[in-house]
């Protein structure tokens, strides 16, 4: 597992990570979310020894990264697209990594096939598209068949088929019992992929919870009603202190109550209802509500 214990990192006077603690467990995909400047990249780089913490530590299967004798057999990381030398072919990049980490040569061919790069194995990395670079980074992370996988924005530059492939891959890795730690700004993908969420803002932990509970706790219940007596229904609901408004398509959107409550009020007053549908909250909505005060950059603010 990944065990982050009171992790703290400063850059001069700026506190990038502030006593951050959480665990990412095996057998599930843990999504890592936060606004720009929240400390996500700093945290992930500290996990693999690229940043030295000013306080606290990160343990990978009970050890710090620097204490691992064969780190690629414990943790595989894809933190930056196209990190390979541009003059090397995909095959020779992977072969160099395998040989320098005492990994069997057969793994090169296996991960090339697994990531769909076997057809371009002889091409130089400098000519790769962003999506191909992402696949090569993932292939490198998989070389040592590690227990722990770290992926930072893995779907950047991928076409729809590639995005679907990533989604399937990370789920399969978790089913195999591996710890998968995934950072992404794409809420729709995170909602379909992650089981658990760790959310940070301004370097601090904001939430550490399962996906469904997080959405439920940080979303407003909505009910959409189609009725020929919309104004009357809105008057009845407003009289009971229930927020509602008419949509452009003529339906009434009711906030903060469930469908049975709305249906009961309509029925009690003889308001005909042609459609009554509950609208579930989204990860994006819940995330925006939680992190509204923790965002470093806002529209109109500039950088």
Image (spheres, grey):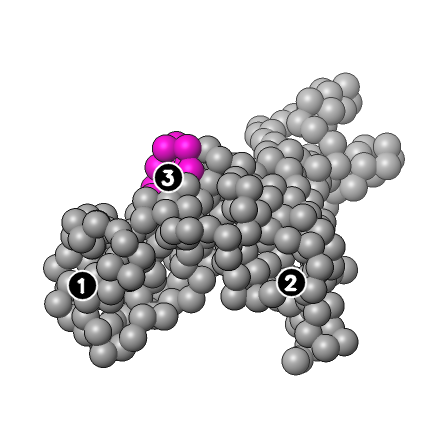
Range covered by the magenta-colored residues: 166-178
The x and y percentages for residue 199 are 64, 50
The x and y percentages for residue 178 are 42, 38
**Position of 163 relative to 87 (above/below):** above
Whole-angstrom CA distance, mark 3 to mark 1, is 23 Å
Is 132 situated left or right of 180 in this image? left
The x and y percentages for residue 41 are 56, 63
**Position of 81 relative to 248 (above/below):** below
Give the residue number, with chain letter if any, for mark 1: 91
Query: Of residues 115 and 302, which is closer to you in this image?
Result: 115
Q: Which element is circle 1 on? A: helix
Determine crowd level at label 1: few under 14, some 14-19, many 20+ residues with C-alpha closer than 10 A.
many
Which numbered disc, 2 or 3, marks the residue closer to the eye?
A: 2
Whole-angstrom CA distance, mark 1 to mark 2, is 34 Å
Q: Any magenta on residue 171? A: yes
Which numbered disc, 1 or 2, marks the residue closer to the eye?
A: 2
Report the disc number at residue 272: none
Is 122 situated left or right of 163 in this image? left
Report the disc number at residue 173: 3
Give the residue number, with chain letter if any, for mark 2: 53
The x and y percentages for residue 205 are 71, 50
- Are the residues at dot 3 and dot 1 in contact (C-beta closer than 8 Å)? no
If you read the primary sequence from the N terminus, does the residue marked by circle 2 or circle 3 appear first?
A: 2
Name which residue lies at 29% across and 75% down.
85
What is the quadrant of residue 275 in the picture?
A: top right
If you read the primary sequence from the N terminus, does the residue marked by circle 3 or circle 1 appear first?
A: 1
Name which residue lies at 27% across and 54% down.
102
Query: Of residues 105 and 288, which is closer to you in this image?
Result: 105
Query: Of residues 215 and 137, which is closer to you in this image?
Result: 137
């Amino acid at each position: 597992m990944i065990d982050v214990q009171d992790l703290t990192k400063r850059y001069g006077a700026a506190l990038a990570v502030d006593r951050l603690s959480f665990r990412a467990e095996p057998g599930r995909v843990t999504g890592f979310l936060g606004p720009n400047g929240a400390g996500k990249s700093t945290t992930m780089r500290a996990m693999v020894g690229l940043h030295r913490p000013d306080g606290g530590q990160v343990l990978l299967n009970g050890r710090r990264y620097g204490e691992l004798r064969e780190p690629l057999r414990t943790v595989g990381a894809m933190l930056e697209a196209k990190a390979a030398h541009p003059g090397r072919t995909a095959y020779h990049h992977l072969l160099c990594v395998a040989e320098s980490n005492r990994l069997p040569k057969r793994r090169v061919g296996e991960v090339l096939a697994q990531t769909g790069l076997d057809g371009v194995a002889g091409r130089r990395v400098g000519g790769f598209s962003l999506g191909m670079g992402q696949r090569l980074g993932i292939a490198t992370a998989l070389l040592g068949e590690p227990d722990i996988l770290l992926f930072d924005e893995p779907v950047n530059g991928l076409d729809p088929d590639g995005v679907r492939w990533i989604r399937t891959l990370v789920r399969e890795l978790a089913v195999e019992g591996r710890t998968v730690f995934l950072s992404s700004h794409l809420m729709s993908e995170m909602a379909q992929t992650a089981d658990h969420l760790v959310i940070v803002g301004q370097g601090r932990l904001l939430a550490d919870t399962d996906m469904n509970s997080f959405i439920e706790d940080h979303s407003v219940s909505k009910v959409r009603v189609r009725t020929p007596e919309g104004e009357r229904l809105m008057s009845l609901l407003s009289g009971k202190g229930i927020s509602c408004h008419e949509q452009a398509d003529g339906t009434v959107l009711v906030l903060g109550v469930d469908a049975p409550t709305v249906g009961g009020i309509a029925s009690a007053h003889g308001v005909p209802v042609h459609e009554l549908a509950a609208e579930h909250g989204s990860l994006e909505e819940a995330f925006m509500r939680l992190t509204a005060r923790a965002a470093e950059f806002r529209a109109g603010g500039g950088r």
